[in-house]
Amino acid sequence: MQADREMLMLAYALHRAFLAEVLGSQPASVPLRRDEAGRPRIEGDAVWTSLSHTRGWVALAACRSHPVGVDIEPIERADVMDEIAHVVCDPDELERLRSLDLAARRDRLLSLWVRKEAVLKAVGVGLQTPMDSFCALDDRPVLIPGVGGRWYISSIEAPTDIRAAVAASAVLQVEGGLLNTSALFSRYRDNDVAADDS
């Protein structure tokens, strides 16, 4: 659809403008490219970055020292989450969510999807790693099978009609923002992307 293509182009342009601000340069001079997995990258990895967009919203993240991932989804997607819970949740997560009423369970499942997609983007594997192979229900460090190190996820404070999360590989500061394409911009600096590193 033309509207989807326009939204994608707008998201890319906003991403480039955001990175120009982070790097202190002009948007046209940002050395942005995509790697083999389709992840946005800055030549020389001066900044790690991530982008997500959905139905009028764009989420952006950048970190100078470690890989970062961000994801955003509209709340309407919660309606189908029960149907795919077995794909999203590891056995412990399924058990812990079972006691919630339907509306709360769907909302928690959507939040879990966003958290897991953000960390898989940071790792650089996207949905190639099954979401049900690791737990990300709480703020403990996440261990992903076949990937070294611990990964940290933080939900992003967002309007009630979306869920968003950012993930990184260490205790660090991530810059980013949520942009409503009707020009509502909320900037955040998230020092809480990590839990205790002990």
Image (cartoon, rainbow, N blue to C red):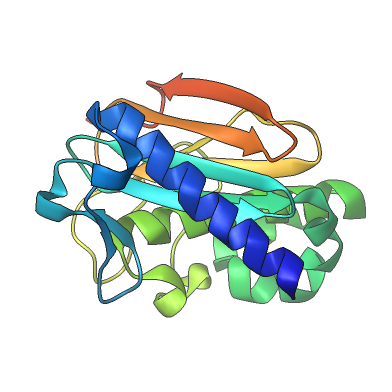
For the residue pair 9 and 160, the one nearer the viewer reads as: 9
Residue 136 image offset from top left, x and y in percent:
49, 51
Residue beneath the point at 90% across and 55% down: 102
Side of 53 where 170 appears, left or right? left
Q: 2 above or below 19?
A: below
Residue 57 appears in the figure: yes
Residue 121 image offset from top left, x and y in percent:
39, 59
Residue beneath the point at 24% across and 31% down: 23
Residue 70 image offset from top left, x and y in percent:
47, 47
Side of 193 where 31 appears, left or right? left
When asked about the image quadrant of residue 26, the answer is top left
Q: 24 above or below 17?
A: above
All told, the count of numbered labels is 0
Location of the C terminus (image quadrant): top left
Side of 147 where 120 appears, left or right? right
Side of 161 where 28 appears, left or right? left
Q: 121 above or below 132?
A: above
For the residue pair 184 and 26, the one nearer the viewer reads as: 26
Q: Given the current orientation, which residue lies at the most extreme right position? A: 102
Residue beneath the point at 47% across and 36% down: 139
Residue beneath the point at 62% across and 26% down: 185
Q: Given the current orientation, which residue lies at the most extreme left position? A: 44
Residue 93 appears in the figure: no
Location of the N terminus (image quadrant): bottom right
